[in-house]
Image (cartoon, rainbow, N blue to C red):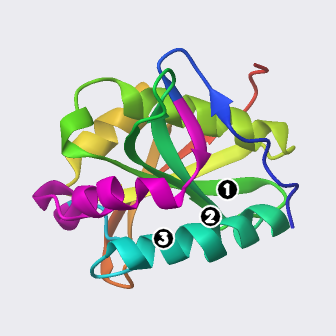
Amino acid sequence: MVEPFSLPVTGTHVGLRPLAARDAAAYVEGTEDVQVRAHAHLPEPFYTIESVTTLAETVVPAGLRDGSLAVLSIVDADTDDFHGSLVLFNMTEADAEVGFWLHPRSRGSGRSVSALELACRLVHDTGMTTVTARTALDNVASQKTLTRAGFDRLDIRRGTAPSGQEIDLVHYERKLVTTW
């Protein structure tokens, strides 16, 4: 078990906070985007306002409380508007895996890189030393984002995506040696 995260956390342009019921409509809209559907390999095939609200009210607080899962919203640092999702999962004493997606209206803004920086700071603050990520082989945008966020590309291996689908995955890691 890892120590619970200190949230919310805010950077220059973005913040990370627990997914909330008020994010449900934008979250659903984002998950219906063609690019998110093609590349995010989300755990659920479809989301509804009700399912996201239930997630926000049950799974999110339980995961944060026991330190096993952090389902976070990427938000504007000033307005708190929802821009995407970032999840920390598969946590051990030493590392955590990160997954993320952005709402289509927020792409190209640098928010993903900033959100990954904040996530690395959160993970570092719990005492973990590594953040890992996996992305589909054809998800070039996420590969570029991970590289810009300081992740090193390791290899390509067949594996199970959060959706349960077996696909070729590009593996990344970032060693957390920096103090913030």
Disc 3 and disc 2 in contact, CB within 8 angstroms: no
Local packing at callout 2 (Cα closer than 10 Å; few below 14, some 14-19, many 20+) is: some
Give the answer, above or below, for where 100 lies relative to 174. Answer: below
Disc 2 and disc 1 in contact, CB within 8 angstroms: yes
Which mark is nearer the camera, 3 or 1?
Answer: 3
Task: Residue 94 in the image: state x and y as whole percent.
Answer: 80, 54
Give the Cα distance between marks 3 and 1: 25 Å
Is residue 37 within the magenta segment? yes
Local packing at callout 3 (Cα closer than 10 Å; few below 14, some 14-19, many 20+) is: some
Magenta segment, which residues? Answer: 15-38
Q: Which residue is mark 1?
A: 96
Which mark is nearer the camera, 3 or 2?
Answer: 3
Which of these two is toward me, 5 or 167? 5
Q: Does residue 104 appear left or right of residue 126 in this picture?
A: left
| Three-letter residue code for mark 3 | Thr
Q: Which residue is mark 2?
A: 89
| Residue in the image at 25% along x and 55% along y | 30
Task: Residue 164 in the image: state x and y as whole percent.
Answer: 39, 85
Which of these two is toward me, 80 or 161? 80
Which quadrant does the N terminus fall into?
Answer: bottom right
| Residue in the image at 79% along x and 42% along y | 6
Place residue 29 in its image quadrant: bottom left
| Among the two numbered marks 3 and 1 on one chain, the one whose residue lies closer to the N terminus | 3
Place residue 81 in its image quadrant: top left
Mark on residue 53? 3
Q: Main secondary structure of the magenta part?
A: helix
